[in-house]
Image: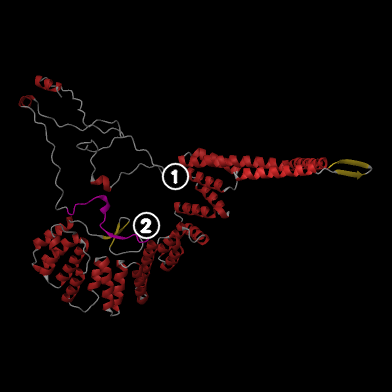
Amino acid sequence: MIQVILFLITVGLVAAGFVWFADRPGDVVINWMGYRIETSLMVTLLAVLALIVAGILIWSIARAILRSPEQVSLFFRHRRAMRGHLAISRGLIAIGSGDTRLARRSADEAARLSPGDPLTLLLTAQSAQLAGDRAGAERAFFEMTRHDETKLLGLRGLYIEAQRRNDGATARRVAEQAAQAEPSLAWAGQAVLDDRCAQGDWSGALKALDATRSVLAKDDYRRKRAVLLTAQAMALQDSDREAARVAALDALKLAPGLVPAAALAGRRYAETGDTRRAGKVLTAAWRLNPHPDLAEAYADIRSGDTARARLTRMQALADKAPEDPSAKREGAIAVARAAIDAREFKIARDALSPYVTAPSKRIATLMAELEEAEHGDVGRVREWLGRAMRAAPDPVWTADGVVSDRWLPVSPSGRLDGYEWRVPLAEIGMTHPVVDAPPPPLPAEPQPQPTELAAEAAPPAEPELAPPAEPGSPSGPPDREGGAPAVTLEAVVAPAKPKSKPAEARPAEPIIPLVQAPDDPGPETDPYSDPIPEKTSSSDGWSRLKGLFR
């Protein structure tokens, strides 16, 4: 609306100017080269305006003619770029769908039409990866590192390719270059950190962790730094015990419940004779995370104490455990261990009595020691040792399916802080506490009672043979209701091994993992439909009559 008003005002001003000139006529005389031109003022103004318009038109035409080669070249370049863009789009879609042939053809076309384009280089590298051409992929990624805008992407690709061929030196060098180029790059910082941890260079690992502090969550950073400080303390405990104690205390400030740091700091304090601080450190960690390592370190803070003094100290520590069943059980085990050493068998038995109905391995073993120390009853000892073999496992330090007798900062796969205090194989669903008390069996299906006449006339029932499994259909006994195969423990623990091709004939992994369609389970059957009656060769009349009503 405002623009319309301004347009009308402008038109009105121009019209008013023309009217003003029309109301004030005058003559214009031009003498030039013997020519005399006399005309009115309005005609002169119109002539000047026409000359200006003609000059502009002539200049525009001349400029267009002069710039026509450049415009034609720009048109063809733009057309070429659009074709290259379309080739890149087709190639990326082909990579996502796993069409190796179309991806390579699109990459070649994009390289011809748009050489040096970042997306062209990416398409070339990923199409080479899809086709299994590792050398071609590395060449494309190396070409990316020559350009500033694709340097980090190229380094990332070279790092992945080095990992695929198990070239740790090249992967480490590439990750260091990427970390130097961009310190906040998460994957590069993590790769450098993992490499420092694998080499045991804890000082270098701490520096690498500090370089990636901006991209880590606060809790994650504090936990990882505490673990690295604990690892550094463990490495220094034989050479510099004071530095080991300081590093362990720094780790406890970041993660107060970190068991190995607390146990190490408590032992170092006890070695210097400062039992008060040792007890304070261990008690604070025990309140947060009751653990056998803390109980063992707390029992040994005074080397000259008697067994009864250690028992009193362990009873005081057990009373400070949180109100949690697992924490109370750890306290009871610690008290029972100290009571057996002090030959206070009643205290040990009272501590373990709430857990003897469904004991774990440690509790059953302690009960065997208690029976041997108190009564020397070999039969009871064997009974408890047998129950220990069948009892539920206790938590241990485990990572990547590997069990360790002590905490380690790095898991076997190279993962920092990978070891956890938990029951091994707890994730596969073994929920019952002990084998001594198995779950009750399922009730048997009621069998149909035959009539008296049919029972007399029917021949002895032969055992039915299970039909052979159809291709694609699951094997195993069917479920009672749905016809699905029953799940066994072997099927959960040991998954089926897929049939794979030889290494040289195995196709390359797709760039974008896609969910494969499940195998055909076979023709659907109605679990409630009646089975087809089997043919019988019996000449008995009652059998043929009964077969009609099956």
Quadrant where the C terminus sits is top left
- What amino acid type is highlighted by mark number 2? Ser
**Vertical placement of 168 versus 301: above or below?**
above
Q: In the image shown, does 421 or 390 lie closer to the viewer?
A: 421
- Where residue 506 sits, quadrant-wise, is top left
Q: Position of residue 440 (x, y in %)?
A: 14, 47
Labels 2, 1: front one = 1
Can you give x and y, in whole percent of width and height, for residue 221 in the image?
Answer: 40, 63
Residue 329 sits in quarter: bottom left
**Mark 2 = which residue?**
413
Depth order, front residue of 277/111: 277
Q: Is residue 160 left or right of residue 301?
A: right
For residue 295, which numbered disc appears in the image?
none
Q: Which residue is mark 1?
A: 512
Q: Residue at x 32, y 60 (%)?
A: 419
Residue 274's spot in the image, x, y percent? 28, 79
Q: Residue furthest front?
A: 23
* Disc on the earlier residue, 2 or 1: 2
The kind of residue on which mark 1 rests is Ile
The answer to if 242 sits in the magenta stretch is no
Is residue 197 shown above or below 499? Answer: below
Q: Is residue 238 visible?
A: no
- For the magenta stretch, what is the residue range? 411-434
**Residue 482 appears left or right of 145:** left
Q: Considering the numbered disc 2 on the image, is that residue within a helix, a strand or a loop?
A: loop
